[in-house]
Each structure stands twice: as C-alpha cells, then as structure tokens.
Image (cartoon, coloured by chain):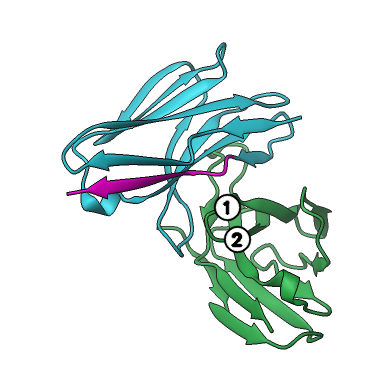
Amino acid sequence: GQNIDQPTEMTATEGAIVQINCTYQTSGFNGLFWYQQHAGEAPTFLSYNVLDGLEEKGRFSSFLSRSKGYSYLLLKELQMKDSASYLCAVLDSNYQLIWGAGTKLIIKP
Amino acid sequence: EADIYQTPRYLVIGTGKKITLECSQTMGHDKMYWYQQDPGMELHLIHYSYGVNSTEKGDLSSESTVSRIRTEHFPLTLESARPSHTSQYLCASSGGALELPEQFFGPGTRLTVL
C-alpha cells in the first residue's frame, strides 16, 4: 500500500528553526510537495522536489532523498504566522497526489 | 494568484436534501479534483477529472457524483445528504504536462448536514 508518515504535532519557539520530516512509500514517484494549511483554510503550495537535494525559498527549504524515501521541510526565523499544518504529498506513478495527514506546528513566543 | 472559486462557502441543510457544490477555475487547467477533509485530518480524494467529459472516482468511497461539461466547471452533487457528509469539501486544479504539477485549491465549502 501507499503510505506517508509525518509527525502529528510539533512545537517551536518564535525566531527558532524547525525541521518537519516526511517519509513515504508509494507506487512510483514523480515528485514531492509541501503545502501549508492554516486552520479552516485551503492548502497553499510551498515547495516541489523531484530531484535529490535541497531547494531553498526564502525562510523555507525542502530536502529530498529518493533512495531513502525521505524529505524534510526546514523553517527558519519562525514567526507566529507560521503556526499551521504542513502537509507532505507525493505524486505517484499515476500522477495522483498521495497526502500525509499533516504536521500541526505550534509556535510559542 | 490562483483563480479557483467555490460556492457556497458555508452550507447548512437538512437530511435528504439534494445539493450541488460549485467549483470554477479560470486558469484553463485540464485537471480538476474534489477532496473531503475533516478538521485536523488528511485530505481524501473523492473525484477527479483530466478533461472535459472525463471523470473518475478517487480513493474515498463517496455517494456524490461529478460532471465536467466545460473545462472551467466541475460541480459536485449529493443526491441525498446525510449527517455523515458533514465535512469540508475542497476543489483543486492543476495544469498541463509542461507546467509544474502543483494543485491550486479553492477556499472550500464547509457543509453541515443536520
């Protein structure tokens, strides 16, 4: 079966750095997405990785290792507005998005 | 800025009613999707379409139906709503082979069935 695992909840301090991990087992791989979702709102796109390595975009970076079935999202200089759920999703061999349950990130002052 | 719209944003109805949730996008995307999401839970794909007159069921068993008569429009219909249908319904779209396969989401419809 297809499976995506990420921690249910994480807590971090404003101004700090946090890393949210995602491991996956899917039938085929055509890329991995990270989305941000604030409570009661729709997901918004953060990053897309299809090749191994680190992609940096401002305060957010995403890393992929295809051989390990592993990705992480790194958030630097945390702000209170970063409190949200972060969803990991993999595009499988049928180009369907397989979604993780999301990691709820709580930022404390 | 993604241009994908859903109406209504909120809907409270009684059991047994027929309802249609509307979704439209102005990006010319071929692919459109309907997801169901309960609070704090993962997204479940209920229907998708890869183009006009093409519709498929997703992983989540659903008593809903969809149609795709026009590229920009992908409505979801519940013939007889039940309390178990209470959830958030999210519509999304994505572009063609030459575009990043990112899905753009509408704002969602929060449905409550009494």
Magenta stretch: includes residue A101: yes
Residue B84 or residue A29, whichever sits in front? B84
Q: Which amino acid does label 2 sit on?
A: Asp
- Across and down, in percent, residue A106 comes to 32, 48
**Mark number for residue B38?**
2
Q: What residue type is labelled 1?
A: Met
Task: Say which element carries label 1.
Answer: loop
Label 1 sits on residue: B41
**Residue A36 in view (yes/no):** yes
Residue at 47% in and 21% down: A64
Chain letter, colour cyan: A
Chain letter, colour green: B
- Across and down, in percent, residue A90 comes to 59, 33
In the picture, measured across the screen, residue B71 lies left or right of residue A49, that is right
Label 2 marks a residue whose chain is B
Q: Most prominent secondary structure in the magenta stretch?
A: strand
Residue A25 or residue A108, whichever sits in front? A108
Residue at 77% in and 68% down: B69
Q: What span is in magenta? A: A100-109
